Image: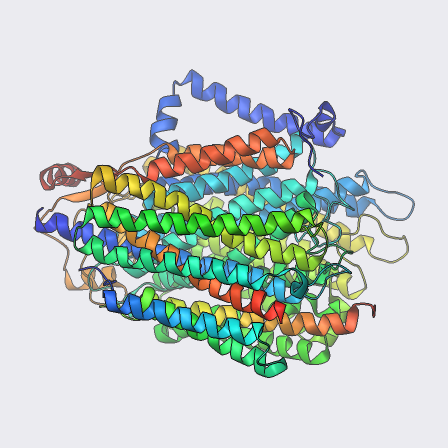
């Protein structure tokens, strides 16, 4: 049913919360007030607007993605700590400190924000920062679209965080199965917040998929054929293919669910012919490619880091490419393994189980290739290498638990148990998160001009690794003992509590790791004069991003590079082939624009309005968005030129 | 030069005529009850996909690019993924519906 | 126009048109998902009407021919763009617009008649999926109509510049794509449903 008052369903009761939610909301508001005060005091509003909000520079957009992902990582870790604390305390006669509903909201928020805002956030960070540099390009294919994508992502982030203060979030898990998410069982705004924050962010992701796909296909520098691209770029290309063909499925699925809720359609309802199982099928048809979207860039990062810190060429470039291609195609053919137990026939389960097992093979090929790269290399055990070694251990275990789960009879025992929870955290933390941390440390000097402090990085690594093991290996055991996921209370005498306690200790250690990372960044900024990267190439790198200054100029490359091999920059260094007498030409750069930011603001408003059924605001924000986009797309004057002489002046100043 | 060259007037007229024909044939098969069951479904299937192919080639000039046939390649890949999702979902849902849904 | 400028414009043109084609491929997945949902739910009429009872084939045939004709007029406008014939391009787009608007109008009529009889999207899963699939296509066509209107203004005021040419090519791809999707709706929803 749709309301039509001035404020729709929004009343003062939306602001009423329990003590913990109040505390969290107030902290968030205080943080925002602190930021606003700081900006006002330092008179930085104009800087914020012109340098960041209007920027079309992927290097800036990448940093903004990182900022959002970092905040959400903190929130997600706090959620995790709260969940673990509850599960330690809530045994037998005690029911812990969280109500069931609140507990459910927390694990829903935890999953949703970790996947959509931390996971997707960190991969878009690296796409924006690294891809143009690695292919010798000055920008992405569609700079304006890139900004729109980010601001849509930001709108989704804002919506999710608004749910903490105004109204509530979904309690139906990050997957939001029907019929629980239908209006009959969840008439409140929680599920709507969930739907629209990920729907809007998802559109941003889809547009980024288009953008980076075209960028890699069309904007590689002369000489860089497909088989000469860095492997990281290959993984990004594969990831964009996954995004292109998976995200529309999510858009439709969430759309149909929202139609069920708003317009009384019957796609996934339990009456009038609806089919809740279809929701599960469609959700995972997106959901499985999604997890490969998260992991492939991490594989790509390791393919960059391992050769550089083994001081040896990557082993098996061609087989790596084929492995990536195989993983891409296979990831579309396995999705049923997320619902083996829903009741399909043994033939169906067997087929998808077999396909799932197959995917382990190209993954294994990649791991062997990295290890063979290290063999007989001259290893430098820097933090990125440590993260890689941590990954090899943990991800392999997680992958093996995945192969176990791919066996349907075993899955019938382990489905939705803590064994499953341990498996996916194992591969996501061991793979995606460790991979990102390796990439973050590796590429940090390129964008800031100074390295991160090694010692603090090592401490962070060990805390994360040990913390992860403590937090999740007990869960494997608990799962095999029969503990299901999402339990807010369990009986005494099961012998589960000790394991939950160890897991809780693990979260504390992970927090320490996160703390070391924050400390590392702050300390490195303070100490930067001692860690300067003056050459642009602090690691003796192999790929093109290391051939330019740190941080790079706005236009990345003053002269478009010309390559003729894999590891182009390394080869150039070997041949002594570095541009001694550059010949400059005019270059075209996109003009910055506030429209991306405005679209994000309008879509946030749209999302908020549609959640609270404030119809007039829905219409206005939607029409305004369409009008604004049309107006911008009619605009022809979107570029400006940096002349050859200006370029020469800037470059010579830089070199003196 | 641009990748996608425009078709000639003749190709559009040919495309349009073929599409009208294919549409009318399919329409009359159904309206006049000329076939039923599996034969009907197969005929409609063939007629529909043929018309789609005519439009893809004669209106959208698919595969007629001057260099690197990226348009064609990504189209084919899309068709592959769509087929997987389609056939997979139908197989799965059919299996689920027959085994899980109550007999009404 | 210098050769460097021309090269830059051509690259821009090719890049944008390719990017738009890639977006259309994602839209195929979007429609594909709606189609598969329709196929799964098409027999879930829950006591309500099935396709046979509500589809009026002559009406749909008319819609189909109208849309096909609009795809034709839109297609040949590309030839006139190449010949820099501003007037003819505008004329053909006006015809395309009118045909497209007729299509949308007919579809809206079909929907309102169904709702009046009590056969709205709320009645059954079949009707939900039917309305959503067809209306999503109709929504795309409506967006296309807005685009055509905007382009007519651009052609009139700016002439057939490279940028306008680029946008018209994307529009043509979009419009043709919508007719291809319609073939599948016509065949697999209407014809199969009515037989």
Residue at 34% x, 28% y: name it: A50
Quadrant assignment for the C terminus of chain B: bottom right
In x, y percent, where is residue A587? 17, 44
In x, y percent, where is residue A573? 20, 60
Image position of A306 with respect to A141: above or below: below
Image position of A159 with respect to A179: above or below: above
Of C169 and A65, the residue lying toward us: C169
Q: Which residue is the extreme one toward the top?
A: A41
In x, y percent, where is residue A252? 57, 54
Q: Could you tell me if residue A394 is visible in this image?
A: no
In x, y percent, where is residue A55? 34, 36
Of B47 and A522, the residue lying toward us: B47
Of A539 and C195, the residue lying toward us: C195
Image position of A219 with respect to A610: above or below: below
User: In the picture, residue A592 is in which quadrant?
Assistant: top left
Is residue A55 toward the left or the right of residue A493 in the image?
A: left
């Amino acid at each position: 049913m749709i309301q039509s008052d001035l404020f729709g369903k929004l009343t003062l009761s939306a602001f009423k919360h329990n003590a913990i939610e109040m505390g969290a909301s107030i902290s968030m508001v205080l943080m925002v007030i602190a930021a606003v005060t700081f900006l006002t005091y330092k008179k930085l509003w104009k800087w914020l607007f012109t340098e960041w909000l209007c920027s079309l520079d992927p290097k800036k957009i990448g940093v903004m993605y990182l900022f959002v992902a970092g905040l959400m990582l903190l929130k997600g870790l706090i959620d995790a700590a709260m969940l673990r604390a509850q599960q330690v305390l809530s045994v037998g006669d005690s029911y812990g400190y969280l109500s069931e509903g609140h507990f459910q909201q927390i694990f829903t928020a935890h999953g949703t924000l970790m996947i959509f805002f931390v996971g997707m956030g960190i991969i878009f960070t690296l796409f924006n920062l690294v891809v143009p540099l690695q292919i010798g390009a000055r920008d992405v294919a569609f700079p304006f679209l890139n900004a729109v994508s980010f601001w849509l992502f930001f709108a989704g982030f804002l919506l999710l965080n608004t749910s903490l203060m105004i109204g509530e979030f979904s309690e139906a898990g990050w997957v939001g199965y029907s019929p629980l998410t239908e209006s009959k069982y969840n008439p409140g705004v929680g599920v709507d917040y969930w739907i629209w924050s990920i729907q809007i962010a998802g559109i941003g992701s889809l547009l980024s998929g288009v953008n980076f796909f075209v960028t890699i296909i069309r904007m590689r520098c002369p000489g860089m054929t497909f088989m000469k691209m860095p492997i990281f770029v290959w993984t990004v290309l594969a990831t964009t293919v996954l995004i292109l063909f998976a995200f529309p499925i999510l858009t439709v699925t969430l759309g149909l669910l929202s139609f069920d809720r708003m317009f009384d359609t019957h796609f996934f309802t339990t009456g009038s012919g609806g089919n809740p199982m279809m929701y599960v099928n469609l959700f995972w048809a997106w959901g499985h490619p999604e997890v490969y979207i998260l992991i492939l860039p991490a594989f790509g990062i390791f393919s960059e880091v391992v050769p550089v810190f083994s001081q040896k060429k990557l082993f098996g470039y061609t087989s790596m490419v084929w492995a990536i291609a195989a993983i891409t195609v296979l990831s579309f053919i396995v999705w049923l393994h997320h619902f083996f137990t829903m009741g399909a026939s043994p033939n169906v389960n067997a087929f998808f189980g077999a396909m799932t097992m197959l995917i382990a093979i190209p993954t294994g090929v990649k791991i062997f290739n990295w290890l063979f790269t290290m063999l007989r290399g001259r290893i430098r055990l820097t933090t990125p290498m440590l993260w890689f070694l941590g990954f090899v251990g943990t991800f392999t275990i997680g992958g093996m638990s995945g192969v176990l789960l791919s066996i349907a009879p075993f899955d019938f025992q382990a489905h939705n148990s803590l064994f499953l929870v341990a498996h996916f955290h194992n591969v996501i933390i061991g793979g995606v998160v460790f991979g990102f941390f390796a990439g973050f440390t590796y590429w940090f000097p390129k964008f800031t001009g100074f390295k991160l402090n090694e010692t603090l990085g090592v401490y962070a690594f060990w805390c994360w690794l040990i913390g992860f093991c403590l937090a999740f290996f007990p869960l494997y055991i608990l799962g095999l003992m029969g503990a299901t996921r999402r339990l807010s209370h369990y009986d005494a005498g099961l012998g589960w509590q000790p394991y939950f306690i160890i897991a809780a200790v693990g979260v504390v250690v992970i927090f320490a790791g996160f703390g070391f990372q924050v400390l590392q960044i702050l300390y490195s900024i303070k100490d930067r004069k001692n860690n300067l990267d003056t050459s642009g190439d602090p690691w003796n790198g192999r790929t093109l991003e290391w051939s330019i200054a740190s941080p790079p100029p706005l236009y990345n490359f003053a002269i478009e590079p010309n390559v003729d091999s894999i590891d182009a920059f390394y080869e150039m260094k070997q041949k002594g082939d570095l541009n001694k007498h550059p010949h400059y030409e005019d270059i075209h750069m996109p003009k910055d624009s506030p429209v991306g930011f405005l679209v994000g603001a309008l879509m946030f408003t749209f999302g908020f309005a549609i959640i609270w059924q404030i119809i007039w605001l829905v219409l206005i924000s939607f029409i305004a968005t369409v009008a604004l986009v049309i107006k911008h797309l009619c605009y022809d004057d979107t570029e400006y030129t940096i002349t050859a002489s200006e370029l020469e002046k800037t470059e010579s100043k830089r070199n003196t | 030069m641009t990748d996608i060259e425009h078709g000639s007037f003749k190709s559009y007229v040919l495309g349009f005529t073929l599409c009208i024909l294919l549409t009318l044939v399919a329409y009359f098969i159904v309206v006049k009850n000329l076939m039923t069951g599996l034969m009907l479904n197969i005929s409609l299937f063939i007629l529909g996909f043929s018309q789609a192919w005519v439009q893809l080639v004669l209106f959208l000039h698919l595969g007629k690019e001057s260099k690197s046939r990226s348009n064609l390649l990504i189209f084919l890949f899309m068709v592959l993924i769509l087929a997987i999702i389609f056939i997979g979902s139908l197989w799965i849902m059919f299996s689920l519906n027959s085994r899980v849904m109550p007999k009404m | 126009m210098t050769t460097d400028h021309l090269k830059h414009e051509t690259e821009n043109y090719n890049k944008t048109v390719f990017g738009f084609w890639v977006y259309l491929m994602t839209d195929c997945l979007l429609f594909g998902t709606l189609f598969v949902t329709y196929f799964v739910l098409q027999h879930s009429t829950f006591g309500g009407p099935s396709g046979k009872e509500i589809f009026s084939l002559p009406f749909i045939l008319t819609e189909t021919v109208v849309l096909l004709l609009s795809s034709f007029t839109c297609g040949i406008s590309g030839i006139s763009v190449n010949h820099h014939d501003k007037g003819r391009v505008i004329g053909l787009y006006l015809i395309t617009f009118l045909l497209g608007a007729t299509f949308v109008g007919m579809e809206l009529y079909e929907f309102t008649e169904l709702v009046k009889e009590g056969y709205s999207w709320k009645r059954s899963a079949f009707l939900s999926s039917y309305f959503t699939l067809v209306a999503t296509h109709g929504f795309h066509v409506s967006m296309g109509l807005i685009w055509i209107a905007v382009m007519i203004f651009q052609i009139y005021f700016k002439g057939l510049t490279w940028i306008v040419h680029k946008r018209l090519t994307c529009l043509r791809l979009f419009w043709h794509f919508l007719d291809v999707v319609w073939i599948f709706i016509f065949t697999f929803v209407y014809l199969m449903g009515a037989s």
